[in-house]
Structure formats: structure tokens, C-alpha cells
Image (cartoon, rainbow, N blue to C red):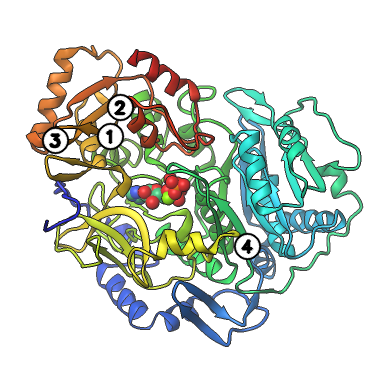
Amino acid sequence: MATDIESVLKEQRVFPPPDEFAASAHVKSLAEYQRIYKLSVDDPEAFWAGIARELDWFKPWDKVLEWEPPNAKWFVGAECNISYNCLDRHLSTWRRNKAAIIWEGEPGDIRVYTYQMLHREVSRFAAGLKRLGVQKGDRVALYMPMVPELAISLLACARLGATHSVVFGGFSSDALRDRINDAQAKVVITADGGFRRGAPFPLKEAVDKALTETPSIEKVVVVKRAGNDVVMKPGRDVWWDDAIKDVSADCPAEHLDAEHPLFILYTSGTTGKPKGVVHSTGGYMAHTYLTSKWVFDLKDTDTFWCTADVGWVTGHSYIVYGPLANGATILMYEGVPNHPEPDRFWDIIERHQVSVLYTAPTAIRTFTRWGDEWPNKHDLSSLRLLGTVGEPINPEAWMWYRDVIGGNRCPIVDTWWQTETGGIMLTPLPGATPTKPGSATLPFPGVVPEIVTHDGKPVGDNEGGYLIIKKPWPGMLRTIYNDHERFKEQYWSQIPGCYFTGDGARRDEDGYYWVMGRIDDVVNVSGHRLSTMEIESALVSHKQVTEAAVVGRPDEVKGQAISAFVTCAAGTKPDDAFKQELRKHVAKEIGAFAKPDDIRFTDSLPKTRSGKIMRRLLRDLAAGKDTVGDTTTLEDYSVLAKLREDEE
Ligand code: ATP
Ligand code: MG
């Protein structure tokens, strides 16, 4: 077998950066990118040292990198604090009165924090945590709505050197309990609720339930947000306002070793038992700082909106740490995109004059289904750059994003990275890289990817294979919390000395990377190993299909048969004739061998709370098996139940 995964998707459109954009960008041309890239891989230590010197360090490093695969140490011997770099560093400049966070609640309330104000609130809360007994080296769990106190909590923990572990507020109490116990957290920060879909939702009850089985927890801090009645357990539970009452606002940032663990974040678990990914301080800071600056081309005039929840790594790296280290203005929104109407995002962009928007393909596909009339009601001319992350974006959704949201004017940065990588790895630089719809394009400086066969041999142009990273990079995960063996086994055992991403990809004749999704999602049909994402993309390119999930199921003749779950545009008749039409459409787009064997129509697909399709569950369903494995991250159980009912 010449290749491990066949790639069948061919996309020809190319969009060069607009001249005007390129002229003022941080990186202005492909030639400039290539020059920087070459320097960065010829001498990565010099490259990253140069970047790190743009930040503040309490003590310089003795050595940039110590690499004993799979263990890396960056900025060895240095001392720093990322909270200091996100806040204190800006106070001696004009930025102290610049907006750091513009926050909008779902009900429409707005709060703005300047850098000076944010510094004060973070310092007070850090002092409050200290008074509650939190010290450097402790773990603190955060289970919160998208309120400013969430960002403040991250920065306060970082200030003290307490390792934070954010558990997305949509997770169940069981998920919270397991994560608290795995990390042995001492304190939980939560709220009396938040607003979502027009109503307050509870949070504290789930904490109370989880805490019946979490012996490590000593204190709970509760933000007043939603006005829900909550039970406060005396001696354990403290209101946020009381926690910061009468503390001094003078709480200097701890001097931390560059390798000090900044946070633990459990991956979303689309593939099984959650893993506590551990990130460092100094390397993570350099990586998120530089990627924020170059990928989003951040300027002091920008208002940057990353729509992710801080419960995901995207929110850690590109709501909080990266942009604030750059002294940028970020927008943070509490609620859902369709409250009170499906134009909430576009309304926010118009009112706050957002200039850079970073969102997920799943959101974009939802917007296309809601219809163009919603964005068209608003003036989106403040936007100058768009980004995506989280999944491969199918070219049709990319084109819609470009036309309808970006007015054919804004470059799109499709950024590939993972919880484990800490920051962006494959991406266009918007002033430099011509983009192709559906491709994350080229490696970020300092990143050395390769596509290989299962035994580590590089594949040729346009051949599919496994995406690996050959050299260490500063934002890389350092371990799996309490399970260094799993870290070695999961990421470093397949191809010795290289980081194994678990994703499939191909590289085209221009060196562009096309990520094809996780390798667990590959189907093997009559000897063809196909990426399900490519078949999905072919389905979605039919104008009446809004979303599709494709999985393999066992088949005696072909090895595997292709099962497709399809959501249609309003007004489509989901009958056998339409199934035939879709099969023909896939045959035309890819080839007859990729035609789905069965197609099921559904109103929605089972997704994680971060919006990713849980194909693992659909695979079980298609094979007629019961669902096994962890489903605690599933957003809506009823979707799965409904699909199963349809089955019977
Ligand atoms: P788990 O590892 O627990 O199963 P997860 O992989 O979904 O969960 P994340 O770390 O948030 O958790 O997601 C990283 C994955 O998302 C990547 O490995 C890749 O499969 C996908 N991904 C992210 N960005 C892109 C992108 N721009 N293009 C293609 N795929 C992407
Ligand atoms: Mg993953």
C-alpha cells in the first residue's frame, strides 16, 4: 500500500492577501514569512529567544531549550509570571487606560475593564485567594459562566502560581467531580449561575453535588451573577465579594520558574477518557503571545473577539493569555448566538466595532442554516480579519464566511492546533499567505510538521498520512497530569522522537496542509482508506445539506460500509429520491467508491459542548451496538436518544 490514507478532496480556489491588508500587517509577504520560517527552523532557540525578549522576565534563562525526548524544558532557569505580562507590563505605558476586556452579558449588560482596572481586580482576587489559603503549587478548579470573573480568576491563579483547571460550565457534576479529584484541587470558583438562551441556569447545585465526593476541596468561591437561590455551606462557601473584602490591592506576581505548571485542561473527550493536559508558564506565554500577534495581526486599534468559551483551550490561549500579553482589547460574550434573535453575533460586531472575529466551523455551518438575512441586517464593515478553529472547515462554509461575513474583503485564517499544542501550529499569516478554502495552509514559524505513513516514512505530495510534529515547540504540553506514562504512550510512542497528533492530513504541491480529521475517523472501503471528513465535505457541498457526519460500519464484503447522517436545509424533502441524489452527488465529487451505503436524515447530530461531532457514538449506532465509553461531554443526550429511536 503506497499510502495510509487516500485523499480525494480537490480544491482549486486561491485567495491572495489583499494588498492593503498586507501593507500594514505584522508579516507582509510570503517571501517575508518564508525568510522568518527558515530562520526559525534553522535556529529555533535563537528565534524563540528573540520573541521571548519582547516579554518581561524576572530572571533571564540560562538556556533556551533542554530537549530529552519526550521531555522539553523551555527558558531553563528563567523566572516569570504570565499574569504580570498580561497586566503589570502594560501599566507603565499608555495602555493602562486602554480597554482590556469589553464584556457583554446575554441579557445585554455591558462591563468594560481597562488594563489598570483589570490589574486591580486580579490583584485583589489573588489576595483574596491567598487569604483563603491558596498557595503557589495548589490546584484551583474553575466552573463558571462566561463572566469577567472567569478571566480574572485565571489571571489571579497565575499570579499566585496556583495551577488552574477550568471545567467548562456546561459539564455535569460527575465530570466536575472526576476532574477535581484527578487534579486534587483545593478550591473551586463558581457562580450562582449564568445566562443562556434567555434564562438563568444553575451551577452551584452541580458543585454541591460534586463536592459530596471530593475530599480535597476546602473552599468554594461563588460569584453572584444570575440571582439564583443557592445554599452556602458555612465555613466552606464564600461569596466572591466577601473573598475580596478589605484585602489589599497590592499583590505582586510570584516569581515562577518558567516550567511552573500554569494550568491543567482536560481535553474534550471526543475519543474517550479525558486527559489532564498540563501546560507550562514561560514557553506557553511565548507561543500564545506570538501567535496572537502574527496570526490575528493584532494592533492597538483592534477589538478582537474569540467566541470560544474559556472552558476550552481556545479561550485560555486566545481570549485571555495571548491577546492580553499583547495589550489587545478583547471582547467577551456570555451567551448563545441566537438570543434574542439569530443575529446576536452580528449585532455585537456592529455595536462594538469588532475588527477580528475568531470562531468555529460548527458555528459557521449553523449560521448558514439560519440564513443570510441575519448578518445582512447589520453593518459588518468594522471586520478586517476572520478566523476559524476546532475542526476542518468544509470549503462551502469557508466561502460563505468569506462572502457573507467578510464581505469578500477579509482574509480568513484557518488555524489548526490542539489542547495539547497550547497554541496555533498550522495557519496562514493573514498579510502573507494566499489562502485556499479548507486548508490550514503552512506551519507557523518554529513549527516543523511532517506527514508520514504508519511506520514513519514521509509521504509524497497529495498523499494522505499521519500528521506529526518533528521538533519541540514552546507551547507544547509537558505531561498528562499524574500520568506521564500515558503522555509518552499517547503522543510519543508511534514515531520515536516525534509528537503524534492523531490527525490525518495531506500536503499539496505548494506545501499546504489539509487536515482531514482524526485518524480514528478513517473508513476502509474496498481497500480505500478514506477520511470521513472528505466525504462529509462532499455531502455539505450539496446546497440542500447543512451538516453531515460520516462513519464506517462493519461490512462483510467491503470491509467497511459508509454510513452518513445528514441534516438538511429547511424545505428539503428527506425521501429516497433525495438519498439517491446525494449518493450521486458524492460519486460526482469524489468517485463512486465513496458513495454512502446508507443515509439517515436527522435534525441534529450528537456533539460535544464545544460543537464537535461525536462520531464515536454514531459509529456504535451505525454498527447497531450500544454506546460505550465516556459520554459526559455530550451536549444534548436527547439527540442520541432520538437517533436511536429512529433506528427502531
Ligand atoms: P479529544 O482529544 O479529547 O478527543 P479534541 O481533540 O476534540 O478532544 P481539541 O484539542 O480541542 O480536543 O481539538 C483538537 C482537534 O480539533 C485537532 O486534533 C483536530 O482534529 C481538530 N482541529 C482543530 N482545529 C482544526 C483545523 N483548523 N482544521 C482541522 N482540524 C482541526
Ligand atoms: Mg484531541
- From the image, tell me which residue sits under label 3: 558
Q: Amino acid at mark 3?
A: Lys
Tell which circle, 3 or 2, labels the residue nearer the N-terminal end: 3
Judge depth for marks 3 and 4 and give the one in front. 3
- From the image, tell me which residue sits under label 2: 622
Q: Residues within 10 Å of mark 2 (few under 14, many from 20)?
A: many
Compute the Cα span from label 1 to label 4.
37 Å
Q: Which mark is residue 317?
A: none
Q: Quadrant of residue 571?
A: top left
- From the image, tell me which residue sits under label 1: 551
Compute the Cα span from label 3 to label 2.
15 Å
Q: Is 224 rendered above or below residue 121?
A: above
Some atom of ligand 1 lies within 8 Å of the CB belonging to the residue at label 3? no
Secondary structure under tag 3 reads loop
Q: Is 299 rendered above or below residue 204?
A: below
Q: Amino acid at mark 1?
A: Val
Residue shown at the point (77%, 50%) measured from the top left = 216
Tell which circle, 3 or 4, labels the residue nearer the N-terminal end: 4
Judge depth for marks 4 and 2 and give the one in front. 2
Residue 429 image point, x, y percent: 34, 61
Q: Amino acid at mark 2?
A: Ala
Secondary structure under tag 4 reads loop
Q: Residues within 10 Å of mark 3 (few under 14, many from 20)?
A: few
- From the image, tell me which residue sits under label 4: 262
Q: Amino acid at mark 4?
A: Leu
